[in-house]
Amino acid sequence: MIEVCNLNKSFGNKQVLKDISAVFENGKTNLIIGRSGSGKTVLMKSIIGLHQVDCGEILYDSRDLTKMRFRDIKELRKEVGMLFQGSALFDSLTVFENVMFPLEMFSSMTKKDMMERADFCINRVNLTEAKNKYPSEISGGMQKRAAIARSISLNPKYLFCDEPNSGLDPQTSLVIDHLIKEITEEFDITTIINTHDMNSVMGIGDNIIFIHEGRKEWQGSKNDIFSCENKNLNDFVFASDLYKKIKNVNNDF
Amino acid sequence: MQWLKTVGQYFILIKTVFTKPDRWRMFFRQLPKEMESLGVNSLGIVIIISIFIGAIMTIQTKLNTENPLLPRYSTGLVTRDTLLLEFSSTIMCLILAGKVGSNIASEIGTMRITEQIDALEIMGVNSANYLILPKILAFVILMPFLVIFSMGVGLLGGYFVAAFTDVITVSDYVYGIQYAFIPYYVTYAIVKSLVFAFIITSVAAFYGYYAYGGALEVGKASTKAVVNSSILILLFNLILTNLMLV
């Protein structure tokens, strides 16, 4: 479980995160949603420790990241997996080598065990046929799956996904969403997903946090969204005609 | 005061680079790859440039020293000393600053803007150490060999002029390149090349590592890397020459 308490972050005079407190539960897909520039990426990067916060606490199962020494943060990061918006696979390595990379860097397994683990992760994301290909030789969706395989190779306790569906078609997005949800439940990971995608929100949003202008305005599950009265959330979620119609149908019932 | 901030940032990066690698095995896997990519793959350009410069230098020296008072072997001697003292160590490094420097800056810069460096950091890897240290060491190790190779090929270029033209006789040229040879010049060239190799790789890596934005920024980082490492090479050339030869 990850807990953030009274998180504040500024860049110069501009305060980007304003007193944010939230709980991200394990075994659930926790979504951070909000408009572009609302501060959700800064929130995610602050939780990971890529940004130093001005004040507040970030608790990884009661271990406060803001009070950790650099060495301890490095150790903690071995428990963290991250799926980047652009996949961030290493260009010079094949899919298999990408998945092997964290294992070779940090695990004390034998070479054979590492290869078995890498094969397991690649099979888990259904990418066996592309394991010897380079990132430039596979599609965007396959790259995302390869990045998921790499991020779970060290059995992480925490998984961060920064806009996992950006640049993907709706069908592939669905595959990625379900894969993340399955992995989260299967390995009991605390997963935090940063997204704009309403299909993801409605499909896998176990715990949703809505950020507006740096403040947490709402927290709940995908089922609570329809009954929520928050204007900013409604404007954001039901911006499209399709979702307006869905809401109307839902209200009629 | 921006330059002072840049210098400080450079030294902070260098401090991060020169730490114990997270995994020696991974470091020793990267090192030969970098030696091949930065050093061995530069052999082609070293051969082409050195052979032509050696040949041209021989012709120009001969044409510009047409004086009966000068001994006939002086052309070979001047060619040799120019190659040893300046061309193979300094000019060759300036050329390699363009090739190797832009290669390193664009590679690391691209990794930065495509979040590959962030991915390394989140895994808990010291990205600066993992990416930059093998490059610096690989180039510093191979540079003296490239310089000595360049000297040899440059002298061969001069020999070809002697062998295939009427500018100078082979015997005069061969006598000249052996006459009054000072081995310390080779030491001087090697010391300079070690310093220049460090400058080329570390400055290029610095600009690549701190590239932010898009493809345009990577291009700018690459240009800055080449320009600034060239200026530093010239500056350190002056300092080292003063220290070692004066």
Image (cartoon, coloured by chain):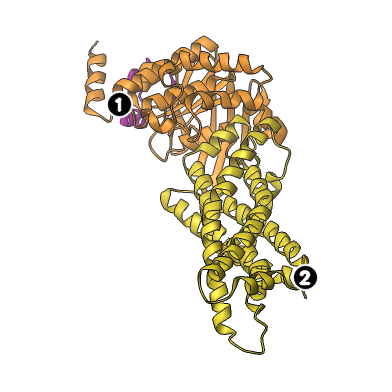
Query: Any idea which chain is the orange one in this picture?
Result: A
Q: Position of residue A79 (x, y in %)?
A: 62, 23
The local secondary structure at tag 2 comes to helix
Chain of the residue on which disc 1 is drawn:
A
Q: Residue at x 62, y 63 (%)?
A: B88
Quadrant of residue B33 within the rendered picture: top right
Q: Amino acid at mark 2?
A: Leu
Compared to residue A38, the image places residue A27 above or below, namely above
Q: Position of residue A44 (x, y in %)?
A: 51, 32
Quadrant of residue B34 within the rendered picture: top right
Closer to us: mark 1 or mark 2?
2
What residue is shown with label 2? B243
Tell me what hue chain B is rendered in.
yellow
Mark 1 crowdedness (10 Å alpha carbons): few <14, some 14-19, many ≥20: few
Cα distance between the residues tagged 1 and 2: 64 Å
Chain of the residue on which disc 2 is drawn:
B
Please give left or right for residue A146 compared with residue A175 in the image: right
Q: Position of residue A69 (x, y in %)?
A: 72, 35
What residue is shown with label 1? A169
Q: Residue at x 57, y 80 (%)?
A: B62
Span shown in magenta: A219-238
Location of the C terminus of chain B (image quadrant): bottom right
The local secondary structure at tag 1 comes to loop
Q: Position of residue B161 (x, y in %)?
A: 53, 69
Say if residue B76 shows up in the picture.
Answer: yes
Mark 2 crowdedness (10 Å alpha carbons): few <14, some 14-19, many ≥20: few
Say if residue B2 shows up in the picture.
Answer: no
Q: Is A226 inside the magenta-drawn segment?
A: yes
